[in-house]
Amino acid sequence: MHEGVANHLSVAVSADGRQFLMNPRGRHFSRIRASDLLLLDARDQRTLARPDAPDPTAWCIHGRLHARLPQARCVMHLHPKFSTALAGLADSTMYPIDQNTVRFHGRVAMDEAYAGMALADEEGDRLVGLIGNKSVLMMGNHGVLIAGASVAQAFDEMYYFERAAETLMTCYASNRPLRIAPNDVAQTTAQQWLDYPHLADDHLAEVKAILDREAPDYRD
């Protein structure tokens, strides 16, 4: 789901969320090891003057979310193909048309005020105000942001959101009417997703098991 070296992931390590780990600037996701992660403090105004300063857009987005949303333990901001395509439509609604899309029914905040790259704290604060207590922010003309209570939850949400966007965009390409689930069915199924207690943990555990076999140096 990476876009070159331009996307960013972070995870809070302090109780208030203000201290967090984030991937370094200019490093491909596939090459990042545990020891490469930057330990940052959302209150440190000198962060961008560090020799190993993070990407400014990452700091302005992730820093403000961790400063103001302690429940956002893990933040993923990506530009995956299908989610970004959906973000480019005049109507970026994730319609409940299958079991994956319905997972996000009533749980997606929408940003319709894209004005360029996030290069100021004010932009990060604006995104904080939009996402609130929701876990998904569809960023019009931009991409998608996930704020989860754990690494596993954020990863699983991002994975399924991109799969859901792929299904929806594929249906749009057919130029046939969507089969949209009734609101009560969508609400019930979305809650059923939330009630699956171990899905995200199991998903991440399997990904780690694959990495342990194929690229174990990520733990170094």
Image (cartoon, grey):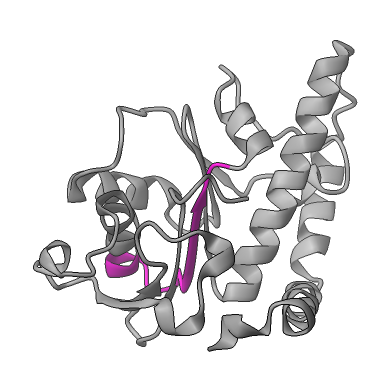
- What residue is at 73 percent from the left and 77 percent from the top? 211
Instruction: Indicate whether residue 67 is drawn in magenta.
Output: yes
User: Which residue: 55% across, 57% down?
Assistant: 135
**82 w.r.t. 184: above or below:** above
Left or right: where 189 falls relative to 111: right
Q: Is residue 44 left or right of residue 23?
A: left
Q: Position of residue 15 (x, y in %)?
A: 36, 87
Magenta-tinted stretch: 66-79
**Residue 189 higher or lower than 154, as above or below:** above
| Position in image of residue 174 (x %, y %) | 88, 15
Q: Does 46 sit above or below residue 216?
A: above
Q: Is residue 153 left or right of residue 33?
A: right
Work out whether residue 192 or residue 41 is closer to the camera in this orientation and state it. Answer: 41
Q: Where residue 129 sits: x, y (%)?
A: 34, 49
Residue 194, quarter of picture: bottom right
Residue 59 drawn at (x, y percent) = 27, 58
- Give yes or no for residue 157 being in the magenta stretch: no
Can residue 89 be seen?
yes
Could you tell me how many numbered marks the image carries?
Answer: 0
Q: Kindly tell me whether residue 104 is visible in this rendering.
A: no
Camera-side residue: 61 or 112? 61
Q: Residue at x 15, y 70 (%)?
A: 50
Q: Residue at x 79, y 19 (%)?
A: 172
